[in-house]
Structure formats: C-alpha cells, structure tokens
Image (cartoon, coloured by chain):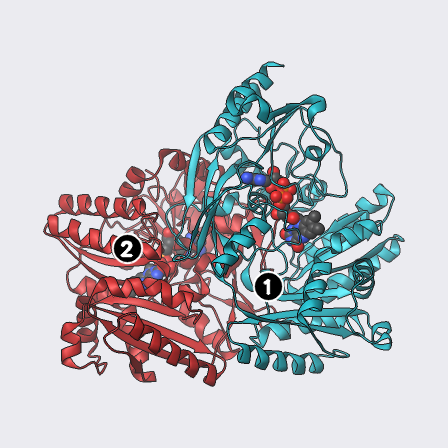
Chain colours: A cyan, B red
Amino acid sequence: MGDVAQRLAEIVGANQVLTGEDIPDHYASDEALVGEVHRPAYVAKPATTAEVAQLLGAATEHGVPVTARGSGSGLSAAARPRPDGLLISFERMNAILEIDTVNHVAVVQPGVTLSELDEKTAEAGLGYTVYPGEMSASVGGNVGTNAGGMRAVKYGVTRHNVLGLEAVLPTGEIIRTGGKPVKTSTGYDLTQLIIGSEGTLALATEITVKLHPRLRHGATVLAPFTDLDTVVRAVPTILAAGLEPHILEYIDALTMAAITYTTGLSLGVPDEVREASQAYLVVAMENRDPDRLEGDVASLGELLGELGASDVYVLDGGSARKLIEAREKAFWTAKAAGADEVIDVVVPRSAMPEFLARSRELAAKTESGVAGCGHAGDGNVHLGVFQKDPVKRASLLHDIFAVGMELGGAISGEHGIGRAKKEHFLQLEDPAKIELMSRIKHAFDPAGILNPGVLFD
Amino acid sequence: MGDVAQRLAEIVGANQVLTGEDIPDHYASDEALVGEVHRPAYVAKPATTAEVAQLLGAATEHGVPVTARGSGSGLSAAARPRPDGLLISFERMNAILEIDTVNHVAVVQPGVTLSELDEKTAEAGLGYTVYPGEMSASVGGNVGTNAGGMRAVKYGVTRHNVLGLEAVLPTGEIIRTGGKPVKTSTGYDLTQLIIGSEGTLALATEITVKLHPRLRHGATVLAPFTDLDTVVRAVPTILAAGLEPHILEYIDALTMAAITYTTGLSLGVPDEVREASQAYLVVAMENRDPDRLEGDVASLGELLGELGASDVYVLDGGSARKLIEAREKAFWTAKAAGADEVIDVVVPRSAMPEFLARSRELAAKTESGVAGCGHAGDGNVHLGVFQKDPVKRASLLHDIFAVGMELGGAISGEHGIGRAKKEHFLQLEDPAKIELMSRIKHAFDPAGILNPGVLFD
Ligand SMILES: Cc1cc2nc3c(=O)[nH]c(=O)nc-3n(C[C@H](O)[C@H](O)[C@H](O)COP(=O)(O)OP(=O)(O)OC[C@H]3O[C@@H](n4cnc5c(N)ncnc54)[C@H](O)[C@@H]3O)c2cc1C
Ligand SMILES: Cc1cc2nc3c(=O)[nH]c(=O)nc-3n(C[C@H](O)[C@H](O)[C@H](O)COP(=O)(O)OP(=O)(O)OC[C@H]3O[C@@H](n4cnc5c(N)ncnc54)[C@H](O)[C@@H]3O)c2cc1C
C-alpha cells in the first residue's frame, strides 16, 4: 500500500478504501455516452463529515485530484475520476437526518437516493419535488448538477429546492450555508454558488431541502399533434392559462414510438391518429381538491383543442404512470437505439420551435439524426444525436449549442457541462465569464484538487 | 474641476456629473436609521451600459471607491457613498426594455422603479411579484439587497424572480449571465452570486425578471389573537393547509395601534376585542376563479378559529388595501415613534415564538423596547429597537442576532448587512465563511473599488 492509500485508510478505515484492481468498474464511470473512462487510483467511502474534511486535507497535502460521486447517474462525465485521482463515494453517508413537518424541510446526507427520500417523505404527506428521470440519483448528485426533471415546470430545479448546505472546502474547512429559512440577505449566497458547480468548488456533506405537501388528486392528459411546431407553440399558452401543470413534456413521434415499443405500453391512441402525429404533449396536473382538478382537466382539454391537438386523452392512473416512467427512461431508449450523444440545450420557451427547426436542418446537412423529447414548460430540449463520426458530431454539437445560445439559451439546462461538453463551453462562452469563473474556482480551491478537468481545462 | 471629475464628465457628459456643494443631500444617504452620512466626492448619472463600464474603468484607474445607487430606499446603509468616492446613480437608466408576454419575463434597466414596472406589467395582466414596502425602490436596488417583501411567502424573493443580468465588473468588463430561461446548468450561477451582494461584486445594467399572471380575485382576512405566541404558532399550519396565501403577516398590538393611528385606519375590530389582542395575523389570498377563492376564504376562517384567533374579519377591498399600505409604512411609523434601529432577523418559521420571546427578554434586561411585525410565512421578523444608548444598543443587537443564528436563522432576511450590521456580521459569522466571501470578492474586484466598507472592513 502506497503512502496515500495508507493515509486514506487511517481516515476512513482500511475496509473503506479501494485501490487498483480491487476497484469495481462502476466507479470509473457515470452515464455520459462520451468521453474517456478511467479507474481512479483510490476510492474512499467516508462515513462522516469529519472524514470528508480529512480526506480533502490529505488530498491537498499529497496533490491528489478528488472527484465526488453520488450514484454515478450523471450525464456530463463530471463524476468520472482521474486515473491518478481519489474518488470520494458518498454511498455510506446516506442517512435522512430529519423530516421537519413544521417547516417543511428535510435534512439529509448527500448519499441519500431520491427513491429513499421519496418513500420517507411520503409517509409525512410531503415530497422533495426534484424528479430527474433517475430515482437512484443522490441528493448530493442533484446539488452537483443542479438537477431538474419533469416537475421543474411547477416546482423549479434543485437550485430552488435546496435551502442550505454543510460543505467541506478543498482546504478541509467545514462551512454551513443557508439553513431552514427560505431566504437570507446576509453576505454572498454560497449555497447557490455551490449548487451546479459539479463537484469543483466544495463537497456537500449535509443538505437541507424544501418539501412540498403532496396533493392527493392527479390527472394526466396526452395530446397528439400533427406537427412538432404546433406542440411547442402551444406551451406558453397552457402556462399562461394558470392551470399550473406539474408536468408539461413534449415527445416527438420517433421517441414516442421507441419508448412505447420498448416498454410495451399501449396508450389507446387509434392507429390513424398515431400515424398522422408528429409529436405529443403530456400534461399532468394535481390538486388537493378533486372537483377543482376535474374543472382544470376540462379547461385543459378545451384549450388543447383550440391549440391544435388532434385529440385529447385523459389517461387512467396505470397508463399515466407507465407513460411517465417510459418518458423517464427515454435516455435508455435513446442509448439502446444507438444515440451517440444526448444533449439538453435550454432556450426561452418561445424559441423552442426555431431551435428545433434549426437543429433538424443542421443535422440533415451533416447526415446526422436528432430526435427527442423535453421539458417543454422550461424550454429544455433533450435531443438524442445520431452521428458516429466524432469530428462531424463535434462540429454538429458546436453548431446546435451556438444556435441555442444565439436564441438566448444555454448549452445545458440541467445535465451540466462536466467533461462531456467542456470543449464547447470553453469555445462558446464569453472568455470574460470563463476567466471570472476560474477566479471563483481559485477562491475556493487554490490547490486545484477538486475535479480538475471538469468545466475548465 | 479635478482630474477625476474631468474624466467622469468626458464619459457621461458634464451636466451628468455633480461634485462638492452641488450634490443634493439625498445622494448622501439611504433610509438606514444608523451610521455615518457623507456626501460623495462625485455623482455620475450614466445613460448606457458602456458609460457604466467606462466609469468603472476610470474608477479603477484612479483608485476611486464606487457605490451604486438605485432609489436610496435601502435600510442597510449599503447605498451610502464614501466621502472620497463616486456615487453611480442609475436614475437615468430607467427604461423598461421589453415585456415578453410569451415567456412571461420583463427586461428592464436597473433604475426602473417598482411602481413604474407594476403599472406597465399590469397592462399585460402580468406582474413582477417582489413587493418590498417601498414602491419607489428600483429593480437594481432589489438585486443589490435581494429584496423580499410581503408576497415572498408565495412568490419568493428577488433571487427567485431574477433570471438574468447584464452586469459590469469592476474591471470594466461587461458580462451577461442567465437569461430568459428559468434554469441552466452551464457553469457557476453568477446571477445568483451577484444578487444580494449589495453592490460589492458587479453593477447590474440590465435585468431579466420573471412575471406572473395577475390573479383577478383577491381577499384579505384579519385575525386578532390574545397572545403573540399563538399567532406565530398558527403560521406553519396555515401554510401546510395548501391555501397558498400571497401575504401572511403578523403585526403586534403596539405596531397595529401605531399604524392604524397614523394612517387613520379603522378596521371594524370592536374595542373589547382590540383591547384583549396582543397580535394580529393578516392573510391575503388570490385566485383566478372567484368561487375557489370563496371556498378558500371559508376554509381559512375555520382554520383560524381552530388555531385560536379571537375573531376573523374579511376586509372589504378598501380597508384591505389601506391595511396593507399601512403595514408597508410600518417602517416610517417605527421611525416616527423614535425607533433607534430596525432589524429583520430571519429564523425557521417554527422558531419565531422562541425568537420573539427571547428578544423581548433581552430587551427587558437592558431596559430597551422591541416591537414590530413581520413576514410570518417566511420566518422574517421586523423589529423596531428602542434604545438610545449606542453601546447598550449594540450589545442588545449582538445578542438578538446571536439568538437568531442559534435558532438556525440569519442576521438579515432581506434588508442586507451593508454598513449598518457589518460589525455584527463580522463578529458572529464563521471566520472561514468570511474569508471565503472575501476571496470571492477579490475574484470579482481585485482593486477593491466596489463599495468598500460594505460587508467587509
Ligand atoms: C435515465 C436517466 C434520466 C435522467 N433524467 C434527468 C432529468 O430529467 N433531469 C436531470 O436533471 N438529470 C437527469 N439525469 C441525470 C442525473 O440523474 C442527475 O444529474 C443526478 O443529479 C445525478 O445524481 P448522482 O447522484 O447520480 O450524481 P453523480 O453522477 O454521482 O454526480 C454528479 C455530479 O455531482 C457531483 N457530486 C456528487 N456528490 C456530490 C456532493 N456530495 N457534493 C458536491 N458534488 C457532488 C459529482 O462530482 C458530479 O459532478 C438522468 C440520468 C439518467 C441515467
Ligand atoms: C418604508 C420601507 C419599507 C421597506 N420594506 C421592505 C421590505 O418589506 N422588504 C425588503 O426587502 N426591503 C424593504 N425595504 C428596503 C428597500 O426598499 C429595498 O431594500 C430595495 O430593494 C432598495 O431599492 P433601492 O433602489 O432603493 O436601492 P438602494 O438603496 O439605492 O441600494 C440598495 C443596494 O443595492 C445596490 N445597488 C443599487 N443599484 C444597483 C445595481 N444596478 N447593481 C448592483 N447593485 C446595485 C446599492 O449599492 C446598495 O448596496 C423598505 C424600505 C422602506 C423605506
């Protein structure tokens, strides 16, 4: 055992450190479809904040790069360790420390998975409303990526649902930011700065999240449209009507065919309607009062008709759940279909039609394919990109990202930049901003040990 | 004219620069009740972002400290210039650049006042939902302080309603952060970092804010309680019921007496109820549907009875408006009554009873008075502090802030630290956090020209 491994073992215990061939494959990767995969030199599994602080102290001392890992379900390659690095896995720090039913917050360790938290909060009639497609994801990983998901249209993304952190700085110092109150104007908002920083500024060791009351009554509506433009054009009007859907997704015909096929789901859409449909809108609403819900479903149905839907189906509970699950699995479907990359550009929602049209044009010009679905309410377009040639693909992605930015959007709405999109980020972002961000990085991490190679070169 | 004034005049035009005796008094101060007031050496009134950039460039070159001013209604002395400094007043950059009814955002210059924006958005049936008590405040000032106000209980504070900025760095560089989309995971969130930084990191020259549909039907309910504890204990239950009030304020009896007296407002509360009341709850709700609103008012009335209200009054439109206005003016009332300081500690809402009880005890021990009201839904307690002796007052404030922090809260919920509470902030905050914040400050402002003396020494 080398010096470093010895030191790590002193901190977390010898049986919580892995090195070399003993490191299982899954620690080498996350779910990004691209980029290099290396086993780290060390994996350490701390049980306490104090251990995390000591690990970071030791890493600084020995100049070892550190990558944090929650569940490794991220899509930006930001949880991929360096071959000479230490992977800190939060799998053992997975306690739910408190469900506070008076203030409507939960205090959790970072390794808690979304399904664990969902189950536990349900018992109290409350819920943490960040639902990225993958329920094995950890709350710490949500903080790392600023995860979104389908319900963000009503409840916001991780940033809007995390109130406070305990975090360890790369120097080994432990700080607490924010807390249970919903607001503060007391110095710079370090909570918000750490959220979405992809493990490059500080490691979250305790997270205080907002909980919302679970509304007992829900309904899901499916509306096919004969063309994709009409679908995305309908979105702002639905939101303006004040019906407050908690899910508002578009799914293009190819993706719908693929996800219903792979999951064996039948939605009761007649063949002739399905064949004439280029895209679908899925709208889910919830209410504490069943009559109000019924009224809203009726209004929505009418509105969808006016907005050009070919038909409107109110799905029964079983089909609704299956459709949402299938949509959540769209990433796996795209991967199985041979997608070479999955991107999640965000644009103002009014710009979705133009963004999609121009992306398709760019794809056609390079003999590539793009297909997908997206959090339409947020203007967040998830596209599977099919182009085997890495050079052509890089240039296509560059052009698609540039269109998104030109339309007032950003490269990633919720998946992050990580290593996977760094090259494009560094090329397309304003150099003054990149410079400023790297000075902020330096303010947190003067030795540069936290996730080097993510966001910056 | 000195060198510096000459240079400023070249940038903004000679008639947009003031120096020495020509500077009207109001540029010397904001509305904080404490602290020193100095006229700045220079006032410049830029008309464009480019001019702001040049002003900051010149300030860096000449080592002149710069303070930004919106409307000067802030309560933390953060808009007070230094005697040797340049005050950049945004009064001429007050255009509403766009009301985007499709994406529900407005793009404004920082000097726009809340009343101007309110009027303009109302025409489109939309609204910017940050309503601090003072409608002459500017949107740029909201960004500076992360302003809150009564509707934060439903709509959040400035932080939750600002989506993007154009900002000038102290180095003179112009950056754009965020934009119209509601989310992004593309590098560090500079928008959130600048919000609430009290003019110490960058100056906002264009602001993209969220707009919400105005709900047509509203009702305001007033409930007297025989003791203050019961009022604040009722708050979490009201929020848990899912009635989504947009205003949820408590007002103690002394403050209620003062604000109704000074505004000549009569609320129809019988003398015997009033005399037995120690505090009031004001709850306002709104809905797009009048029947739903009526149902909610009925549920709320019942709930308030169960929670110990002595009575429940549904106010008519006129009285409701006047009461809300009187509440907004509580600061002026406290000032007129001789309050020596107004503070706005935020705590988890469940901790309000203990916070208030302990604050009263601390006040009694030092023969001081505390009275007030607050954004009860947010756990944000606004207390007028009556104690003429500055040494006793400082020690009382220190102890009250310490109690707030011990209960999991922070020194300020929405007014900011500025110069007014800096001493306490630096004493009570974790030194590791202060150090980190000052490194972040340095990352933005290596020459230290932006609002020196605010937040840090
Ligand atoms: C099928 C599928 C569907 C998905 N759908 C969505 C979706 O709709 N929306 C969405 O936003 N995402 C989606 N994702 C991506 C992913 O689930 C989220 O990004 C999630 O937040 C990752 O959590 P994790 O625990 O797996 O994080 P990891 O992949 O382990 O790590 C992600 C990042 O967070 C950092 N990190 C981990 N723990 C900490 C910590 N304690 N402190 C600081 N940083 C830390 C890591 O270093 C890394 O940078 C999907 C993924 C899959 C596989
Ligand atoms: C009667 C009364 C009631 C109030 N009630 C509330 C309340 O309920 N809630 C609440 O939150 N506040 C309240 N306030 C405080 C105040 O109205 C808010 O803080 C408001 O945001 C200040 O806006 P302003 O334009 O007056 O800012 P100023 O006082 O001019 O400036 C405030 C801060 O913002 C900075 N700043 C100004 N412009 C910019 C810019 N363009 N870029 C960067 N920084 C800038 C300044 O340097 C300063 O640090 C109240 C004030 C009064 C007088």
Outermost front residue = A123
Q: Is disc 2 on the same chain as disc 1?
A: no
How far is the residue under mark 1 from the one under mark 2? Answer: 42 Å
- Above or below, B248 relative to B370: below
Marks 1,2: beta carbons within 8 A: no
Three-letter amino acid code of the residue under disc 1 = Val
- Above or below, A338 relative to A175: below
What label does residue B383 carry, if any?
none
Work out which quarter of the rendered image holds the C terminus of chain A and state it.
top right
Q: How far across and how far down the image is residue A420, in percent?
A: 71, 41
Give the label, 1 or 2, closer to the camera. Answer: 1
Disc 2 sits on a residue from what chain?
A: B
| Residue visible at 34% across and 84% down in the picture | B317
Q: Is residue B35 visible?
A: yes
Q: How far across and how far down the image is residue B162, in percent?
A: 50, 59
Q: How far across and how far down the image is residue B306, in percent?
A: 31, 72
What label does residue B29 carry, if any?
2
Disc 1 sits on a residue from what chain?
A: A
Q: Nearer the viewer, residue A227 or A269?
A: A269
Left or right, A452 with reference to B32: right
Q: Secondary structure at mark 2?
A: loop
Q: Which residue is mark 1?
A: A153
| Residue visible at 59% across and 45% down in the picture | A138
Q: Nearer the viewer, residue B47 or A154?
A: A154
